[in-house]
Amino acid sequence: MRATDHYVVISSDCHAGASHAQYREYLDPQWRDEFDAWRGKYSNPFRDLQTDGRTRNWDGAQRIGDQEAEGVVAEVLFPNTVPPFFPTGSVIAPAPNPSEFPARLAGIRAHNRWLADFCAQEPNRRAGQTQIFLNDVDEALKDIVWGHEHGLRGVLLPGVSPDTPWIEPLFSRTYDPIWQVCQERGIPVTHHAGGTGVPKLPKVACSVVMFVMEAGFWANRALWHITMSGVFDRFPRVRVASIEAGADWVPDLLKKLRKVHGQSPGGFTSDPVATFRDHIWVAPFYEDDLGQLKDLIGLDHLLFGSDWPHAEGLAEPRMFADDLRRNGFDEDEIRVVMADNGRVLTERLP
């Protein structure tokens, strides 16, 4: 394949969500009066959800047109807007406390219902991710099964912050029923580095900088919790994809996993590095050392994500392909990363 040829691109990282008016129609009726009162007081802090650009989240025709212009024909969909009773955009909102949980659960279920209908409009293009909370594993299982039965392709695993003691850490066997149902149904697990799992910060001038500096650590933390606690030993068909977290942290993590495992006779897993390589997919940023990543975790475990409809989404496919070339990837390898590998998240397995 020549560098001038077109690629049919699958993006492992796109975002969608409904407006408040749309979410209201998907909300359980008993919550609508409370939602109306909440909505009247809510002030949206996000500029991309305040202007005409916000319609990109739910305007299917605009979405297809903009993405096809860059060769993107299928996408994995994460949330982007603010579901009912959420304090901020759902991809970065902290976990609810016990008193908030019932309303927030109603809110994500409204989003999941909307997303299932949105994906059903273009089932060959859109791979929606079911949102869950970990406050109650039984309720999370209901949502995972519901999403799978209504056409959603994966489950979005939230992070667990150390300042939410009412939620078990991800290395807890409390979550084995979640891993079991994902294995039985062939449901991929995604973990998006938007900010869940980040401890609450004080509202001071540098808080945003601290959030940006630390969000990646708290997101990546989920992966060593899962790997080193033996999840993949107990559930060998579970697949996990780390999205919008980059991958420049992977080499150091693999080195540390090998060292920790070597210092712990018997260990927690048979071989954490091999386990990571076999079960985890990552979506590098274009600044990452892509050649090294190919050698460490394998060509087949690298994903492309455009982050559409955020500002960088339209330019990202060309930029990332060019960066792969600069890192020594040939055209067939570029096609594998930008198209073939995305099928692990978009195609429903038996």
Image (tube, grey):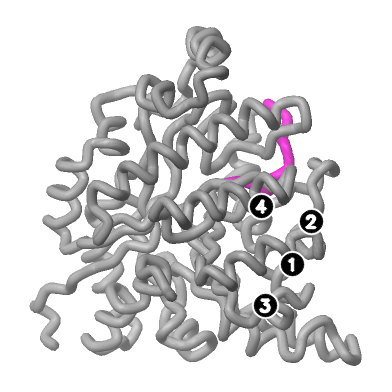
**N-terminal label among 3 and 1:** 1
What main secondary structure does the magenta stretch of the protein show? loop
Q: Distance between the residues labelled 2 and 1?
A: 8 Å
Q: Mark 4 points at which residue?
A: 159
Q: Is residue 49 above or below residue 156?
A: above
**N-terminal label among 4 and 2:** 4
Report which quarter residue 80 is drawn in: top left
**Camera-side residue: 258 or 150?**
150
The residue range painted magenta reads 195-203
- The reply to whether residue 90 is visible in this rendering is yes
Q: Distance between the residues labelled 4 and 2?
A: 9 Å
Q: Are marks 2 and 1 in contact (CB under 8 Å)?
A: yes
**N-terminal label among 1 and 4:** 4
Q: Is residue 21 above or below residue 303?
A: above
Q: Name the residue under label 3.
A: 235
Is 115 on the left or on the right of 134, as rendered? Answer: left
Q: Name the residue under label 2.
A: 169
Q: Is mark 1 on a helix, strand or loop?
A: helix
Residue 225's tag is: 1
Q: How far apart are marks 3 and 1 (CA)?
A: 15 Å
* Residue type beneath disc 2: Pro
Q: What element carries label 3?
A: loop
Q: How crowded is mark 2: few (under 14 residues within 10 Å), some or many (20 or more)?
A: some
**N-terminal label among 2 and 1:** 2
On the rendered image, what quadrant is the N terminus found in? bottom left
